[in-house]
Image (spheres, rainbow, N blue to C red):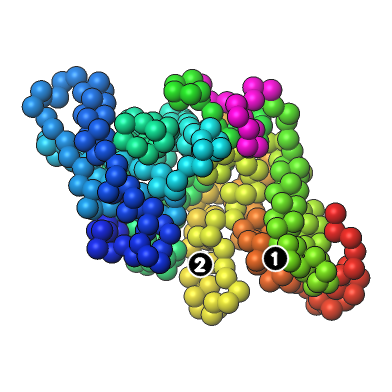
Amino acid sequence: MGARANWHTPDSLDTSANKIHKQIHAIITSANFGHLQEVALLSRQARDGSIASGITCAINSASFAHGMNNLVFKIAFSDHVYWIARVHHAPVDPSRVRENAMDMLSEIATMKTLNSRTTIPVPQVFAFDVSPTNGFGFPYVLMEYLEGQVLDSIIARHVPAEHLPHVASQLADVLFQLENLAFDQLGRIWCGENCDEPPRIISREREDEPSVRQRNQTSLEWFYKFRQQRNRRALEGHADDPEWRTACWVLKTALSYIIIEDRLHVIDWSQAATAPLERLAVSPELITFPALPSSENQIIIDFRDAVRDCLQELVNKAKRTSPTADHKTKLYMILGSKQAEITHRCTYSRPYRALCDGRLVSTLIYGDGVSWKQLVAAYGGVEFY
């Protein structure tokens, strides 16, 4: 988060009608910002022993940015160095303290691993405390302040046309590095309680302690489990509706159109955990939207094509410099394909969108050969599980 982030003030909060605003107000009025300033200064001194002894730092609690889960404050040192304090604003249920702590530690481990193994611009983590009873009063992470701009919409629409080729090249580089950062298991990144150990993969399941013995999982298993969880939620309140049953059946059976056979056991990562390679191809930045006019979707298609071309060039360059490079399916081969579109509808589909996405996927799979009415007649009464 950088200088052009959407910074807010307490006057912008509606604590009577907005739950998140109420949570943010609780932090602003009750957190010990003096303690957080002290932690930041001690961390800075520990990392850079050469800084002048008179350096101070300040956090303006009346200026902040926020998302669905985190609140962000700027830490300003007196020598014009800036950090960010990211604070988890949702109250931590006493029964889920350990689970919340593991989530945060995995996020930190992911950022540290990206920093050490790639050139992707990820903020450096300076200090953290995942306990809700620490001296500040809320779990927090202190990290590097990255200059940048928060986009109001997707890249293809927001970035000026003359800069899109350069941005496409940058995005392709990020995707290329993620594609080649491989692990042999699916799960969350874990670097120990202090995030100072070599990265390993732990289960994504919610448990009290990270498991050191993990069963290898194929991409097929990953997608199947993910889709079934979404389907169960989608059918809550719709269990007897033939159309909803059919939609969930379509979204489940569509998995056979998603899986890349030669990548079945090659696991790469996406976001804060490892995930199948196919998942990298479905960024909202690169997917068209059925409800948009064709002219607006064409902007996205053009940008996606540019990213794919840049990715292909990176792959070709790697092959020229490393003749032993593997010949498995590459990310650029599936960007913009029907397979990627089906993957998007199956993995980005919210439970409330299951019927809509099931219809879209059925058209992608069957075209005009099989109607939705025919599918409902055949599968609307089938027991789902």
Q: Residue at x 65, y 55 (%)?
A: 347
Q: Which residues are magenta?
A: 198-213
- Residue at 10% x, 24% y is 52
206, above or below 377, in the image: above
Q: Is residue 178 visible?
A: no
Secondary structure predominantly adopted by residues drawn in magenta: loop
Q: Of helix, strand and loop, which one carries label 1? A: helix
> Residue 72 lies in magenta, yes or no?
no
Which residue corresponds to mark 2? 300
Q: Earlier in the sequence, mark 1 or mark 2?
A: 2
Query: In the rendered view, would you say 330 is above or below 235?
Result: above
Instruction: Please give left or right for residue 53 compared with residue 177 in the image.
Output: left
Where is residue 167 shown, x and y percent of the image?
A: 40, 55
Q: Residue at x 48, y 63 (%)?
A: 303
Quadrant of the drawing holding the C terminus: bottom right
Residue 354: assigned label = 1
* x and y, in percent, of residue 342 in the image: 69, 61
Kindly identify the amino acid type of the residue bearing the numbered disc 1: Ala
Residue 152 as seen in the image, left or right of residue 51: right
Label 2 secondary element: helix
The mark lying in front, picked from 1 and 2, is 1
Q: Mark 2: which amino acid?
A: Ile
Considering depth in this image, is 238 or 125 the residue closer to the camera? 238
Whether pointer 1 and pointer 2 mark residues with C-beta atoms closer than 8 Å, the reply is no
| Local crowd size for mark 1, using a 10 Å CA cut-off: few (<14), some (14–19), many (≥20) | many
Residue 379: which quarter of the image? bottom right
